[in-house]
Image (cartoon, rainbow, N blue to C red):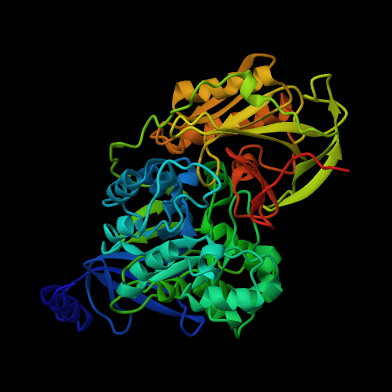
Amino acid sequence: MNKEMTSELIDAAMGRILCDLVIRNARVVDVCNRNSFMADVYITDGMIVGFDGDRKAKEEIDAAGRFLLPGLIDAHCHIESSHLSPSEFSDAVIPCGTTTVIADPHEICNVTGLDGMKYMLDASENIPLSVFLMFPSCVPATPFEHAGAVLTAAEIEKFIDNPRVLGLGEMMNYPGVASCNAAVLDKLESAYKRKKNIDGHAPSIKGPALDGYRAAGITTDHECETPEELVDKVRKGMYVMLREGTACRNVLQLLPGVNEKNSGRILFCTDDRQPQSIVEDGHVNYGISLAIQNGLDPYTAISMATLNASICYGLSDRGMIAPGFRADFILTSSIENGIKAEEVFIKGKKVAENGRIISKAPHTRPVNVSGKMDVKEFSAGKLSFRPGSDHVKVIDIIPGGVVTGNGNCWIKRDEKGEWVHEDRKDILKLAVIERHHGTGNVGVGLIRGYGMKHGAVATSIAHDSHNIIVIGDNNEDMVAAVNRLIETGGGITMFKDGRELGTHVLEIAGLMTDQPLNEVTECLVRMHEIADKELAVNKAIDPFMTLCFMALPVIPSLKLTDCGLFDVDSFSFTDPGIKE
């Protein structure tokens, strides 16, 4: 803002010049006092200039008594998890009432490094959705896998002064913080010098360990598992996010820990939300609605999703309906049972109505982020699994989240010691194939709870390093699925008895596509139907989203990377065979 614009806003507020727009007969949601009042809301140059007095405007809209509330803010998300380019993501979430997101491009940067950061900034620069980025703090997430890039404090320095970069993304390297690792401290210092935020990622961290983590200046966490953990982290000065993604859903789990006294430190986020979830249920408004429907006061919920997020991230121009704030707002008939955006305005312009975007966001062509596949000499021999014992460790899927169990089972082996699949047991082979540097690395283990029969599923989305991950009961289908992804440049594919059942191509870093939202959604709906009917994947899990997290070695308890089976609790590799 400059003094000329300031002068115009003051003149409009004082009634000396015509306002651009007035929304008459609105029930304005006051997120500061947590109530509502009837008013006419005046707007000039995309900013709210007042709601007192009777003045003229160039355009009038009658709200007819509907609620007018601030645009919703997603406090932490990965746009890549929507499979959509930033422009298509904007078109998808704005009709849900989301007008601002704090995005961590951790996923694409793990594949393409600084090229990914530049693409995400460029592609989100001129779209209606306000996209702020956090510079990824952990690329790679751990030293126990191969990512596509290594981003140090020197790389952070190249981008963190950008006004749309609000700080340092989720600090998953808790051991590095706790041990005062020099490289980690250098990254934190980049944020300290600018007084910018540092996001957290601290599942089950408590006691002195949490004290040390918070003492490092880490301000948020979206990985709480219990109401008690939420209260403890708020007590220690952190903002805690209620997350409602596709695979990770903990709004209802954490809601008992939220009350009027601590709600000022609670935010809403989606983290990882797939396109069909957005189309069918909504975006951040879905988590808010769940909370309201389960007893949270609507005004408190709306404040958490607007005012709290703006305060946390220093977004001083949004988050409330008041003079001097951006005219990003929603009109809706009711807030008692949740938030359904009937009309969405950004900077005073209507951008969505009745669940549909009015004008599509401008598209930016991807540069230096496509076709990232460098897989060395992959064959069925790389999928060999000879654990040396009939008693082995197994990754146990726990529906509803990304935490896995550290299980064990008895298996059958052939005369060469090779694992033999048994139809009566829900045990499948899991493999992670390095795809960035042609190392030839392949990690192999066993997993339980996926429920698939006779086939294979593979994806190039495998948090956080995004190597290829494949699950199956036979090597032939697993090899065919991996080779299909190498051919397409990434995505999700399914095979059964040597036959391709379906493929979802993700040509941008193997994570996203330039295809429109409706085509992406239709493709994924078909893919889910096939996974259910043809492969009989466990209905309690998302067949693709769940698989994506089985290579994430920062979430307990047992995971698989391209380097082998990893015990997250001890933060070390482990032999799959159990010695009696």
Image check: 84 left or right of 562?
Answer: left
Residue at horizontal 67%, vertical 70%? 255
Quick one: which residue is furthest to the left in this view?
4
Residue at horizontal 30%, vertical 36%? 368
Above or below for 382 versus 524: above
Q: Quadrant of the C terminus?
A: top right
Above or below for 142 versus 174: above
Image check: 74 left or right of 529?
Answer: left
Residue at horizontal 48%, vertical 54%? 96
Q: Position of residue 172 (x, y in %)?
A: 53, 60
| Residue 338, visible in the rendered structure | no
Q: Position of residue 2 (x, y in %)?
A: 14, 74
* In-front residue for pair 203/166: 203
The image quadrant of residue 372 is top left
The image quadrant of residue 110 is top left
| Residue 284, visible in the rendered structure | yes
Image check: 173 left or right of 399?
Answer: left
* In-front residue for pair 355/532: 532
Residue at horizontal 62%, vertical 24%? 382
Q: Position of residue 396 (x, y in %)?
A: 76, 45
Q: Quadrant of the N terminus?
A: bottom left
The image quadrant of residue 330 is bottom left
Q: Position of residue 209 (x, y in %)?
A: 61, 74
Image check: 79 left or right of 116?
Answer: right
